Every structure is written in C-alpha cells, then in structure tokens.
Image: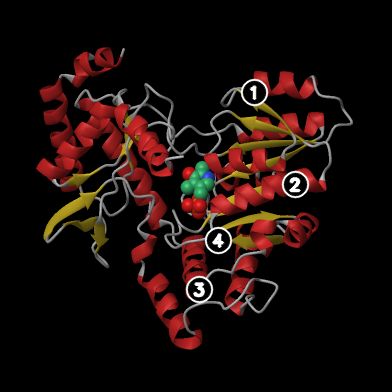
Amino acid sequence: MDYTKSFEDHVAAIKSEGRYRVFTDIRRQRGQYPTADHVRGTSIQAITVWCSNDYLGQSQNPFVLDAMHTAIDAVGAGSGGTRNISGTTHYHVELEHELADLHHKDAALLFTSAFVANDTTLATLQSILPGLVIFSDEKNHASMIAGIRHGGGSKQIWRHNDLADLERRLAATPKSTPKLIAFESVYSMDGAIAPIAQICDLAERFGAMTYIDEVHAVGLYGPRGGGIAERDGVMSRIDIINGTLAKGFGVMGGYIAASSAICDAIRSTAPGFIFTTSLAPAVAAGALASVRYLKVSQKERLMHQERVVAVKMKLTAAGLPVLANPGHIVPLIVGHPVHCKDVSDALLSRYSLYVQPINYPTVARGTERLRITPTPQHTDRDIDALVQSLSALWNECNVNQGIIRQAAE
Ligand SMILES: *Cc1c(COP(=O)(O)O)cnc(C)c1O
C-alpha cells in the first residue's frame, strides 16, 4: 500500500475542483485593526482585513488586553489540568457566572471552543435522553452536524428556516418521543436570521427542547450582547444557548448556558468537557473582561450595524451581487470556486485587501462567495477602497454579466 500516494491523490482531487485551501499568513498589529501585515517570505505587505470574525474589534480592546496581561502576571500561562483535576481556576468560575447571567440562565459551562461545545453537548444529550430525535436545520454549522452524528441517534433535517417543514416533521413524530430542535440564530455564511419565537412556539406545542447556536450573535445583538434571542425577548424560551468567546468577544473559547439540571448533567458526562485541559487562565480572564465590557457598552454594536449598512448600500449601488440578508455578514456571490479564488487573490495582490474565498464544503457548490465582514473600525475610506477595487475586478472579469456562472455550468 502506497500511503503517501493516497494522501497526494486526495489533495490532487481537491485541487482539480479548485477548492484547495491556501492559508494567508498575516500578522495583526495591536491597536491597528483592521490593518495587518501579510507575510510573504521575507517581504511584508500592509493590508486591510475584510474577512475577520473579530466583528467588533474586541481582540484589541485595552480592557481585554489588560485583563490578559494581569492574569499572566498573576498566575502564569497554562491552567495545569482538566476541570476536574486542578484546572478549575477562579477565572473559569467567574466567567461561567458571567455567561449564565448574560443569558439569564442558572448556569454555564466553558469549553475549549464553540465547536467542541456543540459537538460534545449534542452527542451527550443523545446518551442522556435515550431515543432523542434531533430536528436539525439543514444549514447548521459543521460542529452541530458532528455532534448529532457522534451521538448516533435519530435525526430529522428540516429545510432552512422553514417552519412548515419543521412543524410537519414534529407532528409526524410520536408524542412520547423526546425531541430537540437544533438551529442557529445568525447563519454564518448567508447572514439569515432564524424565526426564534415561532420555533419556540412549535417546540412548546410538540413538547420539544430547543438548542440555539448564537455564535455569530453573542456580543453583537441584544441590549447586553446576549444575542438575537435577547434582542427578540425570547432567551427564557430557549433551553440551551451555545456561544463563542472567539468572534464578537474577540478572545477564544466556547460555552453553553442552560438550567442547572442540564449543565450538571453535561458537566458530569460530556467527554469534550471532561477529558481536556481547561482554557488558559489568561484566556478566561480576557473573555471575562470582554463579556463584561460589551454588557454595558453600546457604541461598538451601534457602529457595527451602521458600517454593515454602509458596506451593503455601497456594494449594491455599484451593481455588485450582494446576497440580501438582515444580518451583519455581507456575502458577495461568485458561484465558481476557481473564480472566487482568483478574485480574492487579485484583491490581495493588487489592492492589498484581504477577503478569503469561501468554497465547498463550507458552502454548497455553485454558491462560492466572498464573505465580507465590516467592523466598527473600518473607515469610510476603507469602504470606498473595497467597493472601487471590487467594481474594477468585476468589470474586468465580466462577472456581473454572468460569464463566471456560465463557465461553471
Ligand atoms: C465558528 C462557528 C462555531 C465554532 O466556534 P469556535 O469557538 O470558533 O469553535 C460554531 N458555530 C458556528 C455557526 C460557527 O460559525
């Protein structure tokens, strides 16, 4: 068996589809977001980042940085253990209290990332509730899909944000069967927002639990940054809220917030919670400072929304194919993996603008896109430069006349 050839063939197939991933090597500059250095061997190119999930620039917030420096100076680098064996530091305890309070739940549990939180929680719920059927939105993130698969139980995939399809499937499942509806609030690649209240209505009618991934909403929406469920006044109707500390909050880590009964059961059972070293104390301290800060400060959220509207308006006015949505993500559909990467490469090399191409399997084939994420730190000049560069490239490639799409067919 030629193992090496198997790996090389695998990569060759990915390359032939035009979806081979090349990571852009950047070095961010403290306090200078969204500016960064693009490192190419020995040369350095100053670029503007337009595709970060650091939506509010919290990775640069001085309160967050101070908390992290202070924690390192106070207690050192790593936590030194799993949560059960010496790794529950006071920073972790405080952060869990803060997150429970953010979502008005009894308790919260920290994980290394929101991916791990989704994966291990959804798998574990299936072992705690035998016979559980999970009703999963078809556009759910890979981490939820992984958790649902790992649990090995039954699932029903309902059409994206389609309440009638969800209702039909719930109605067709026996009343006595335990049920869980799993969905996101803001879908990360389209910017679509779920009808949370109506999903909760269905959950109540059919006796289902609810599990929401608010990864792209915590910090960004709601009067205290509690997410779309907080904004819509429906947080108390959701059983389990999943969030990240890495995107809006700008640090790292993931969590769930839920009742004490649920958290106690997950804490006592989930392998992804038990058998791994807890977050570094400085990471927990930074996340804690970030959550506390965004609970009271509105200006980042207001400015973020204002910038999103400005980017969408200017791109649309320039005739560029913005996928309309009510959220803060600005997808520009290209529809072909090779062209998507070409446009992205040209943006970077010719205009010093960094927008990573998004290809399959992150999005469906034929819907390849540039996913633009405005932040409060992007200036009017940044926006104008982005729109002018994209317009020039689009005209050059005749993308707007559908030539790229035809090439794909
Ligand atoms: C990024 C993402 C996650 C994972 O969050 P991390 O904290 O980065 O692991 C989970 N769900 C969705 C929808 C995401 O986009």
Foreground mark, 1 or 2, reads: 2
Q: Which mark is residue 285?
A: 3
- The Cα atoms of the two marked residues, 1 and 2, are separated by 23 Å
Question: Circle 3 — which element?
Answer: helix
Q: Amino acid at mark 1?
A: Leu
- The Cα atoms of the two marked residues, 2 and 4, are separated by 19 Å
Foreground mark, 3 or 4, reads: 4
Nearest to N terminus: mark 3 or mark 4: 4
Dot 4: few (<14), some (14–19), or many (≥20) neighbours within 10 Å?
many
- Residues tagged 2 and 4 counted as in contact (Cβ below 8 A): no
Residue 66 in percent (x, y) is at: 39, 77
Nearer-the-camera pick, 385 or 264: 264
Nearest to N terminus: mark 1 or mark 2: 2
Look at mark 1 in the image and give the residue it sits on: 163
Foreground mark, 3 or 1, reads: 3
Residue sitting farthest toward the front? 1
Q: Amino acid at mark 3?
A: Ala
Dot 2: few (<14), some (14–19), or many (≥20) neighbours within 10 Å?
many
- The Cα atoms of the two marked residues, 3 and 1, are separated by 40 Å
Q: Residue at x 64, y 54 (%)?
A: 256
Foreground mark, 4 or 1, reads: 4
